[in-house]
Amino acid sequence: MFIFTLCLFLWSWLSSIHGLEFRYHNSREMEQYLKDISRKFPDITHLHSIGQSVEGRELWVLILGQHPREHTTGIPEFKYVGNMHGNEAVGRVLLLQLIDYLTSRYLNDPLVTHLLNSSRVHILPSMNPDGFESSARECTYTIGRYNKNGVDLNRNFPDVFESNTDQQREKEVRAVMDWLKKESFVLSANLHGGAVVASYPYDNSNGGSELQGGLSISPDDDVFVHLAKTYSYSHSEMHNGNSCYDSQGFTHGITNGYYWYPLPGGMQDYNYVWAQCLELTLEISCCKYPPEAHLPDLWAANKPALLAYMQQVHLGVKGVVMDSYGKPVQNALVEVEGRRNLCPFRTDRNGEYYRLLLPGNYTIKVRSGHIPGHKTLTQTVQVPYGPDTFSALTHNFLLQNSDYSSTATQLPQSCTTLNLGIQESDSATLLPSVFTTLTLFLLQRLLMLS
Ligand SMILES: *[C@@H]1O[C@H](CO)[C@@H](O)[C@H](O)[C@H]1NC(C)=O
Ligand SMILES: *[C@@H]1O[C@H](CO)[C@@H](O)[C@H](O)[C@H]1NC(C)=O
Ligand SMILES: [Zn+2]
């Protein structure tokens, strides 16, 4: 009896100094772990569910940061999503390890401390818990990939390049869409398996001007390539670009999503086009569901990349757009000259904008979308490399009342498939529902076209 107690004591002591075990935690164990962590670190974590899966499992998100419970002006929101394909289990494991790493090193490790003090990090370890529970521990099969309804969640988002956007959204997808309305995410990645490469938008194309030499190029291509290389070169092998099974390798370990293979209804295009959140799809292991003995090496290979990527949330410029009384202006258009985004970047409900940009000089044009009597404000900013100092350049814009009468906002031509409803949104209180408005208008337009 004594020996048994001693063993039990030693086991729990060892696991507390060695951190989270390298194994697959089922949904119940994962939930328990997240609850334990949030109780152990109440000051820097906040656990909440963003919805349920088809089978009723909670979609748990752990938020980490100096102020985990609410947004703070100037602190960018970052997210990692894992296990969207239920049988691609490595991302789920690595995100739990990342949570363990960040919480246990806060205030001890300078990088971790700077990361959590300067950004708010949201982690959804499993977007498809039902799929995970039904998966086979197998490298290449698709058993468990889909959700309970047999739907591929990474084909189920609205797609700016596709006309059949009236398909039914799965519960897991709706939960993520609602989440994007509530938080103004700036940078994100979703973790997959079956290859080793960092893939960046666009994933789709309709053969318009974005299609160049077989790639579907976004206006922020330079930033996306930089982000993808940041991951692949911080990863121990990804930058070598070796392929897993077929002969096609990836130069620098990165690829344009569409160039690799066209993908309609994907999550990364949705994040970028509608939510102004730059997202990558990270393929982090050849084997989708490898033996547990491989997990420590996979963590070691990806850990520096996961951390370096988080630090990139500080690229570019950020700030508040205010009116002449100093009041933050919601839904002001903040456009960088030379970047014609399908849907222009806009200030959020706090009047804040975040614009990831590489170092250089940029001309930024700010227009209030809905308040009459404000002129367009054009200013040039010199953007340094923010990640080094854990802060993007802060540049606020003060709109002045002008003598001119109201000028109707002209949306960029490239956004014609989406009527943003800016003219309708005269009242600032309507603005949180801008996404609903977007979707409704999109549907209306499509019905008119078909
Ligand atoms: C991070 O924030 C904590 C809590 O406010 C503070 O004690 C610590 O000095 C900060 N560290 C850094 C590196 O910013
Ligand atoms: C940006 O502008 C500053 C000030 O005008 C100038 O000194 C600098 O050389 C410019 N940088 C680039 C990359 O053009
Ligand atoms: Zn996948």
Image (cartoon, rainbow, N blue to C red):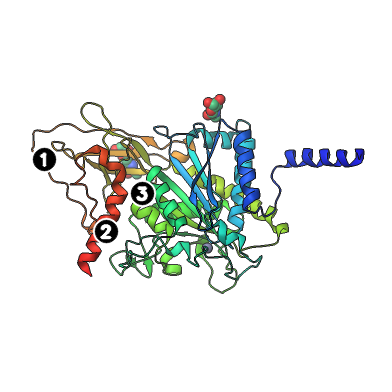
Q: Nearer the viewer, mark 1 or mark 2?
A: 2
Question: Horizontal and vertical percent for residue 74?
Answer: 40, 33
Front-most of residues 306 and 373: 373
- Amino acid beneath label 2: Leu
Residue sitting farthest toward the bottom: 247
- Amino acid beneath label 3: Gln
- Amino acid beneath label 1: Ser
Tell me the residue at 38%/70% (across/down).
Answer: 214
Kindly identify which residue carries mark 1: 406
Residue sitting farthest toward the front: 56
Question: How would you rate the neighbour count of disc 2 (Cα within 10 Å): few for under 14, some for 14-19, many for 20 or more?
Answer: many
Tell me the residue at 27%/46% (across/down).
Answer: 335
Mark 1 and mark 2 lie on one chain; the one further toward the N terminus is 1
For the N terminus, the image quarter is top right
Q: Which mark is residue 276?
A: 3
Q: Secondary structure at mark 2?
A: helix
In contact (CB < 8 Å): disc 3 and disc 2:
no
Question: Horizontal and vertical percent for residue 265?
Answer: 40, 63
Q: Which mark is residue 246?
A: none
Q: Relative to 340, is 226 on the left or the right?
A: right
Kindly identify which residue carries mark 2: 442
Q: Residues under labels 3 and 1: Cα distance?
A: 27 Å
Tell me the residue at 47%/40% (across/down).
Answer: 387
Front-most of residues 314 and 37: 37
In this rendering, is residue 211 above or below 281? below
Q: Nearer the viewer, mark 3 or mark 2?
A: 2
